[in-house]
Amino acid sequence: MTDPQTHGSSEENSTAVAAKCHCGQLTASATVSSSALPLPLWLCSCDSCRFSSGQIAITCAFLPPASDRSSLHITGQATRYKTSEGPSALIRCFCPKCGAFVYEDSPDPNRQSLYGGALTETTGIVEVKGITFNGDARDGGLAPCLPQLKAWDGQKDGGAGSSSPAWESSIQTAQQGGPHVAQSYKDGEGKPELLLARCHCARASFNISRPTPASSAMSLNLEGLFYPSLTTEEWPENEWDIKWWVRGDRKDRYAAVLCTCDSCRRSSGFDVQAWAFVPAVNMHAESGAQLRIPEDLVGLSVYESSPGVNRYFCGTCGAKVFFRAEERMGLVDVSVGLLRAESGSRAEEWLEWGPKLSHGAEARNKHLGQALDEGVRKRFGENADKR
C-alpha cells in the first residue's frame, strides 16, 4: 500500500482520489479537501444496484460536495447506464472493454461517487459506514455477515435505526416477494423448477434448473474452500472425485462463494463478488433449450481477464453475468446478484454458501475484507465438509 498523494495549497491540504478499471482504459479522479477524508463508503442492496451490477451489494464511495473538491476528471471511454430519472438521476459508468464499474455520475455535481472496488487506494481514503436499501434484499443480503454495520431498509437518512437490524424485519416479510421477484415453478406436468437470472435491462436473461444426475457427470479439481481440512496440494487431485458443486443434504443446491480476489474486484469495480457454481447443463435459454454462451444472450460482452479466463457482462447495463475458465468449461460461475429467488438476494433455497471468504487476503479494503471473512465463517462455517 502506498500513502495517498497529498498536495499543499494556500488554504489546506488536498488529496488525490482515483478509481481505475481492470484493463486501465477508464479512470476517474478528483482532488478533495483532506478534511473531507475519509470518504464514506456505503454498501447498497437495492434492486437497481444488484441487478445492474450482478452483486449482492455494491460498494460506493461518495465524493464530498463540489465546493470541497475539484471536478471529476475522466480519462478513457465509459458506457453510461441510467437507473433513475430527474435532476438527481444516477448514471452508472463502466468500461466497455473490461466491464468494470468505475464511477457514478449525476446531473447534480454534488451526487458523484467512485465505486469501491475500483479505488486505487483505500487506506485513509474511505471508511465503511453501513448498508442502505437492505429491505430490497429481503433476506438480509450481506448484513448477517457484517453484524457490526447498521443496515437500513431504505436510505440511511430515512430508514430504520432501531436496535433490531432492519434486515431481520425484511426476512420476516421475504415470502411476500416483490415486483422484481420471478416465482420458480414446478407443475403436475413434469416441468422442472426454474430460477430466473436476469440483469437490470433484461438483455441477459436465462433460467437455472435444480441439479440432476447430469450435473455430476464431470470430474473437476476440488474447490478447497469447502474442504479446509485438506492441504492445498490435495485440492487439484480430487482423488475422491467429489462433486463439490452440488450441495445440500438432498443434493438439490449449488455451491456459492463470496470472492475478494484482485481480478474479481478490479473487473467488477466492487469489493465483493458473489458467484454460484452452476453446471452448463442446468442453464436454460428462455426457449427451454440448454443455454449457449454467448450465442443465446444478445448484447453480452466478453473480457479475457487472464489467459484462459473469460468474464461476461451485459454491454448495456454493465451487470456481471458469467466467469468461465477453460479448465472447467462444464461449470459456469454465475453472478448471484442476477438471481430472482423468492427468499431474497442470497437465494439460499438454491445455494449453499462457502464457509469462508474466497481470496480474503487479496481484499483491497482490509477492514471490510477482515470483517466480512469473520462474518462468513460465523454464518456459514457449518457448511465446511470433513474428509
Image (cartoon, rainbow, N blue to C red):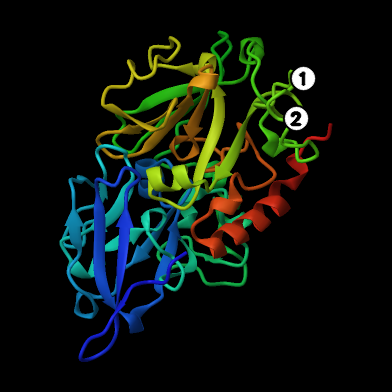
Q: Residue furthest right?
A: 387
Amino acid at pointer 2: Glu
Residue 212 lies left or right of residue 87; in this view the side is: right
Question: Could you tell me residue 333's position as x and y percent?
Answer: 51, 30
Identify which amino acid the numbered label 1 is placed on. Answer: Glu
Percent across and percent down for residue 69 are 23, 76
Q: Position of residue 52 (x, y in %)?
A: 34, 42
- Residue 209, by quadrant, is top right
Residue under the image location 75 percent in, 36 percent down: 227
User: Is 121 displayed left or right of 361 in the figure?
Assistant: left
Closer to the chain start, of discs 2 and 1, is 2
Residue 318 sits above or below residue 246 on the image: below
- Label 2: state its secondary structure: loop
**Is 215 in front, or is 349?**
215
* Tag 2 near tag 1, CB within 8 Å: yes
In this figure, which residue is indicated by the disc labeled 2?
234
Which is nearer the eye, 167 or 384? 384
Answer few, some or many: residues within 10 Å of disc 1's Cα (few below 14, many 20 plus, some between 14 and 19). Answer: few
Q: Which mark is residue 170?
A: none
**Disc sitting over residue 239 in the figure:** 1
Instruction: Indicate left or right for 369 with 121 as reference.
Output: right
Point 77% across, 43% down: residue: 382
**Residue at figure coordinates x 48%, y 60% from the top left:** 153
Local SS, label 1: loop
> What residue sits 60% from the left and 36% below the top?
256
> In terms of image quadrants, where is residue 165?
bottom right
Quadrant position of the C terminus in the picture: top right
Horizontal side of 16 relative to 382 (left or right) equals: left
State the image coordinates of residue 366 (x, y, percent, origin top left): 55, 62
Other-residue count near label 2 (Cα within 10 Å), few / some / many at <14 / 14–19 / ≥20: few
